[in-house]
Image (tube, rainbow, N blue to C red):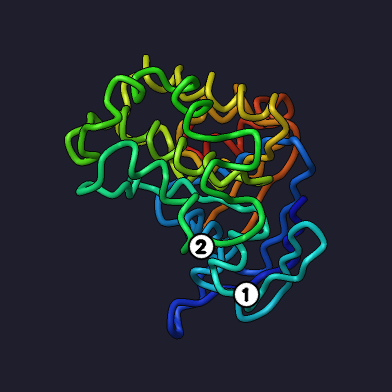
Amino acid sequence: MLTVEKINTFYGEAHTLFDVSLEIQEGEVVALLGRNGMGKTTFIRSVAGLTPPRRGTITFKGNAIVGYAPYKIAQLGLALVPQGRRIFSSLTVRENLLVPTSALAGGKAWGPKGSGRWNLSTVLKEFPQLAERTGQLGGSLSGGEQQMLAIGRALMANPDLILMDEPSEGLSPVLVKQIEEIMRSIREQGHSILLVEQNFGLAMAVADYVYVITSGRIVYHGPPHELAGQAEILDRHLGI
């Protein structure tokens, strides 16, 4: 589904990612773990085309996408659930969810009634809390409801791969458990997920494969059960 090979990403002259490689198979959840400021969000931005790497390659569904505009990458079947939710606070819940189906979104995966698995009806069934608030402004929702809205908005694009950047940030343990269940459901329906997280428990519960990043470099990758036994990696790079 996604192959990233030795990408190097910069902010101006600041070198942020150093030869980072990562791979995601179809229907797989891959977690990228690391402390704050280690390059996790920069990696997400590199894949989504928001901060393209200067060196290295990114291949998504057989397409070499480095240099593609972000909307072109989205139209290939990639959706982003950004850190901080970034929902449209002045739009209603319904309007937020319909943004990916608008004429501006374009692409064959979209349509006024939704041509894929996900449409307004199925998303609201998946998120009953939102179904009760379709006319409410996005900015008036609780943090947990806004996170569900951000995930639901991504699903409305019927993507093959969803990038989730810190979906558990600021949520109570009960809501984190609900996010975990939502990710399991999404994977069961055939979507691949790249999960960027600091919540170790959540990542270990849902991931099929785990990468650890420190100072812009991958320092470990392997199955979750193997990472659980790497005391030095956990202590030195994740503070666990």
Query: What residue would you read off at disc 2?
Result: 45
Residue at 17% of width from left, 35% of height from top? 140
Camera-nearest residue between 118 and 223: 118
Residue 232 as seen in the image, left or right of residue 164: right
Which three-letter amino acid code belongs to the residue tagged 1? Tyr
Rendered image: mark on residue 68: 1
Camera-nearest residue between 207 and 62: 62
Packing grade of label 2 (10 A; few <14, some 14-19, many >=20) is: many
Q: Position of residue 227 (x, y in %)?
A: 68, 31
Instruction: Choose mark 2 or mark 1, whichever is in front.
Output: 1
| Label 2: element kind | helix
Of marks 2 and 1, which one's residue comes earlier in the chain? 2
Residue at 70% of width from left, 24% of height from top? 188
Q: Hey, which quadrant is residue 17 in on the image?
A: bottom right
> What distance separates the C-alpha of mark 2 from that of mark 1?
12 Å
With respect to residue 62, does 160 lie above or below?
above
Camera-nearest residue between 236 and 39: 39
